[in-house]
Image: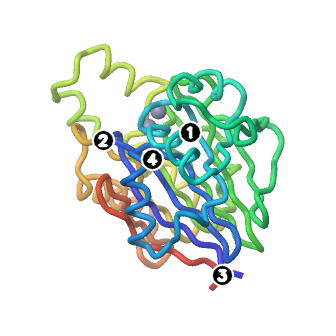
């Protein structure tokens, strides 16, 4: 059994993560052009024709931009909850009826041998979710675009082997940066995005679970730097007696290049 994950794009400019087993190949979000997503799949040695499904967390453009194009081109179903479908229907173009799949947030479902469990997250979209994905005895959780974490979310993801966690902004860079006040308030708000500090604190809670790898994701182009996100998280972990590298691995995802390809249970 092999359960793999690779971030193709991650950031405020577009998000798409490949998750797959030997038999099943899924994209979580598809927020770049279809062409770019296909090029990235090619780069990691994945045949785009093998993609079985596109899962959508929420309807923001940086998560759905290429979903319609890829669904039409590859005849792939798009899975989203009903509120998200209603909010994105006009943005993804005409989708073949059989490729419109609606899930309920409180019910898990299967795509071939991968079990998927959506869960609600606090973000300013119609009905945003994160996903826990299970294959064999391995679990991957994807948790980006959320204003804060709470016990429910931490409990949901802490028995994962690998977590993709948002580390969107450096609070000082955001406050001093060029964004208008309203947008700054939105990002910092309860339905905005997790800061580097929030991510670091959340990881100190995950350490009590099974998590061995955390990939920092959805970094802001304007209000963050990969080195700063990494350094902030590492400092918080270290000051809590956690040794990054031996207690758990912290790795980055990138806005414009594929990240490391992880194979769990290989
Ligand atoms: Zn986003
Ligand atoms: Zn969003």
Instruction: Identify the residue at horizontal 45%, vertical 71% (top origin).
Output: 249
Where is residue 175, by image quadrant?
A: top left
Mark 1 or 2, closer to the camera: 2
The x, y position of residue 159, in whole percent, is 69, 62
Q: Residues within 10 Å of mark 3 (few under 14, many from 20)?
A: few
Where is residue 111, by image quadrant?
A: bottom right
Q: CA distance from mark 1 to mark 2?
A: 18 Å
- Residue under circle 1? 149
Q: Nearer the viewer, residue 119 or 5?
A: 5
Q: Nearer the viewer, residue 56 or 249?
A: 56
Q: Is residue 237 left or right of residue 231?
A: right
Q: CA distance from mark 3 to mark 4?
A: 24 Å
Residue 152 in sight from this viewpoint: no
Q: Residues within 10 Å of mark 4 (few under 14, many from 20)?
A: many
Q: Nearer the viewer, residue 73 or 16?
A: 73
- Residue under circle 3? 265
Q: Residues within 10 Å of mark 1 (few under 14, many from 20)?
A: some
- Tag 2–tag 4 contact (CB < 8 Å): no
- Residue under circle 4? 166
- Residue under circle 2? 220
- Confirm or reject: label 4 Cβ below 8 Å from ligand 1: no
Instruction: Identify the residue at horizontal 79%, vertical 35% (top origin).
Output: 104
Q: CA distance from mark 2 to mark 4?
A: 10 Å
């Amino acid at each position: 059994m092999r359960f793999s994950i690779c971030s193709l794009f991650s950031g405020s400019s577009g998000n798409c993560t490949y998750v797959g087993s030997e038999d099943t190949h899924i994209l979580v979000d598809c927020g770049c052009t279809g062409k770019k997503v296909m090029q990235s799949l090619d780069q990691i040695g994945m045949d785009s024709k093998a993609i079985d499904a596109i899962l959508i967390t929420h309807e923001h453009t940086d998560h759905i931009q290429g979903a319609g194009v890829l669904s039409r081109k590859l005849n792939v179903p798009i899975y989203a909850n009903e509120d998200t479908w209603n909010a994105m229907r006009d943005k993804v173009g005409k989708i073949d009826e059989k490729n419109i799949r609606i899930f309920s947030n409180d019910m898990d479902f299967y795509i071939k041998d991968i079990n998927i469990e959506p869960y609600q997250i606090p973000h300013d979209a119609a009905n945003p979710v994160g996903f826990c994905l299970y294959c064999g005895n391995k679990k991957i959780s994807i948790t980006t675009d959320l204003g804060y974490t709470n016990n429910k979310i931490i409990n949901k993801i802490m028995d994962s082997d690998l977590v993709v966690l948002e580390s969107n902004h450096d609070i000082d860079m955001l406050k001093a940066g060029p964004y208008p006040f309203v947008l700054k308030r939105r990002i910092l708000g309860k339905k905005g995005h997790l800061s580097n500090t929030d991510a670091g604190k959340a990881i100190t809670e995950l350490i009590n679970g099974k998590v061995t790898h955390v990939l920092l994701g959805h970094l802001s182009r304007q209000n963050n730097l990969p080195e700063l996100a990494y350094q902030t998280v590492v400092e918080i972990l270290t000051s809590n007696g956690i040794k990054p590298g031996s207690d758990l691995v912290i790795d980055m995802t990138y806005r414009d290049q594929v990240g490391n390809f992880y194979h769990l249970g290989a």
